[in-house]
Amino acid sequence: MIESEARIAPSADPDAVNRGVAARLRALRRDRGWSLDRAALETGVSKAMLGQIERGESSPTVATLWKIAGGFHCSLTHFLAEPAAPAVVGAEPLVRRARTMRVRPASDDMLVAPLFPFDPALGFELFELTLLPGYVRLSEPHAAGVVEHVVVTSGRIDVRAGGRWRSLGPGDAIRFAADRPHGYRNAGSDPATCLDLIHYPAQP
């Protein structure tokens, strides 16, 4: 393993990540009283695929996780991390370290560190995303009103927003409406990393 690969390698057991996703999906269905048929209707993910994910027989892509999150009207970090403690004014600063949180939550070539899980009081979640060489993801629109803010920290990442690809390097940032088709790719030969702050509209 080259040094850059060692630096960004996931720190969590992939099987443990899959078990966590499976458990949270089962819990969401149970809490809502949904059958697999209802969950498939709401998420646009097939009943067979949902069953395989719940049984730990299939590792979904990030795009599939997004579709499931959208159907259940929850954040992506719901599947990747424990709920965040509510933000408290004047509380002790909260330090999070990406290198200890980095996971490969899906079957595609993206590593994710859920730095700050979704907090309803703040309306956002913050990830570190690492795109491995050759990674491409075209994402379907998220829920209405969702906005993403992406800041590249290393390498080059192409972001598709507003109907075209835009190449971003270290220090470059983009904000876009994520309730429209968008995408990410790393056309280089080294991993590329960015921070992605996803803001959700207030729920009525």
Image (tube, rainbow, N blue to C red):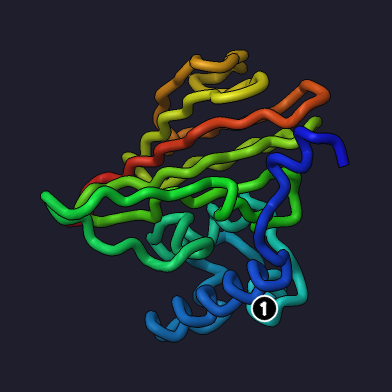
Q: Quadrant of residue 40?
A: bottom right
Q: Nearer the viewer, residue 143 or 97?
A: 97
Quadrant where the C terminus lies? bottom left
Question: Residue 139's spot in the image, x, y percent?
Answer: 59, 40
Q: Quadrant of residue 57?
A: bottom right
Q: Secondary structure at mark 1?
A: helix
In the image, residue 144 above or below residue 66: above
The residue sitting at 87% across, 42% down in the picture is 1
Q: Nearer the viewer, residue 136 or 10?
A: 10
- Residue 174 is left or right of residue 45, and the answer is left
The residue sitting at 31% across, 51% down in the picture is 94
Q: Residue furthest left?
A: 90
Question: Residue 77's spot in the image, x, y percent?
Answer: 46, 57
Count of numbered badges drawn on the protein: 1
Mark 1, residues whose alpha carbon is within 10 Å: few (<14), some, or many (≥20)? Answer: some
In the image, residue 101 above or below residue 23: above
Question: Residue 103's spot in the image, x, y percent?
Answer: 64, 55
Q: Which residue is mark 1?
A: 51
The residue sitting at 49% across, 51% down in the picture is 114
The amino acid sitting under disc 1 is Gly
The residue sitting at 23% across, 61% down in the picture is 86
Question: Residue 85's spot in the image, x, y percent?
Answer: 28, 63
